[in-house]
Image (cartoon, helix red, strand yellow):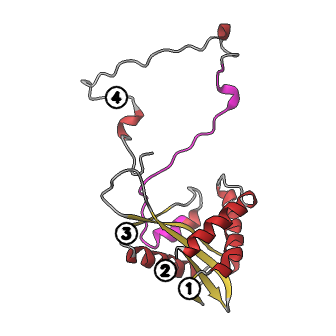
């Protein structure tokens, strides 16, 4: 088994693996529609391969896994230069024999060589196996994304409100003299990426 930079001949196989990864993540609550994104992902993978940001794991010349990396570029100045592991995937039959660890190590070395201070990645909240894998490689929670489904029937529209009027009330003035607040945003002034 060896990990090498991907080349343009690998675009189709890596795209197929990405589609498999996206489909697998649906059981963990991912909103990505796997097959519908195939062409867009194929183009993104082609650009990333040319940029040297995709590595593949080969067993007897067959690609059994891949990792994609990038360097974060944002609108805001930060006190770290962050690299990201955008995607990592190993075929289910080839898991448990160290391929994921080799791909992750390759990604970290590539990003370190590019001068990053920190490597970040995301995983679905209920993907316990992935979380254990990353925690076993010294990754720690840094930021938590919260999500709430909106019930379309519960959203009041102009047509549903009394007399067809939407009440437009100003927000109450903030009293900064009080140390206590019920404003949840008081602890979320700005996130790392401005979101």
Q: Residues within 10 Å of mark 1 (few under 14, many from 20)?
A: some
Q: Residues within 10 Å of mark 2 (few under 14, many from 20)?
A: many
Label 1 SS: strand
Report the front residue among 64 and 130.
Answer: 64
Label 4 SS: loop
Mark number displayed over residue 106: 2
**Residue 185 horizontal/vertical position (percent):** 40, 35
Which is closer to the viewer, label 3 or label 4? 3
- Check the image and report above or below for 53 versus 167: below
Q: Is residue 191 magenta?
A: no
- Residue position marked by numbered label 1 in the rendering: 3
Label count reads 4
Mark 2 near mark 1, Cβ–Cβ under 8 Å? Answer: yes
- Residue position marked by numbered label 4 in the rendering: 181
Identity of the residue drawn at 62% across and 71% down: 46
Labels 2 and 1: the sequence-earlier one = 1
Residue found at the very far right of the displayed protein? 35
- Residue position marked by numbered label 3 in the rendering: 116
């Amino acid at each position: 088994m060896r990990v090498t930079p991907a080349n343009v001949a690998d675009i189709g196989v890596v795209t197929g693996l990405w589609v498999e990864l996206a489909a697998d993540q649906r059981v963990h609550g991912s909103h990505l529609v796997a097959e519908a994104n195939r062409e867009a992902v194929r183009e993104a993978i082609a650009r990333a391969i040319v940029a040297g940001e995709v590595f593949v794991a080969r067993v007897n010349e067959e690609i059994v896994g891949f990792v994609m990396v990038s360097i974060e570029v944002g609108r805001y100045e930060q006190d770290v230069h962050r690299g990201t592991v955008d995607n990592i995937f190993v075929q289910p039959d080839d898991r448990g024999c160290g391929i994921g660890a080799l791909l992750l190590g390759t990604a970290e070395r590539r990003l370190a060589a590019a001068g990053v201070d920190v490597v970040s990645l995301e995983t679905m909240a209920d993907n316990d196996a992935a979380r254990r894998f990353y925690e076993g490689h010294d990754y720690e929670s840094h930021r938590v994304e919260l999500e709430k489904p909106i019930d379309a029937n519960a959203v009041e529209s102009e047509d549903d409100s009394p007399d067809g009027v939407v009440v437009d009330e100003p927000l109450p003035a903030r009293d900064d003299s009080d140390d206590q607040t019920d404003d949840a945003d008081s602890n979320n002034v700005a996130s790392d990426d401005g979101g």
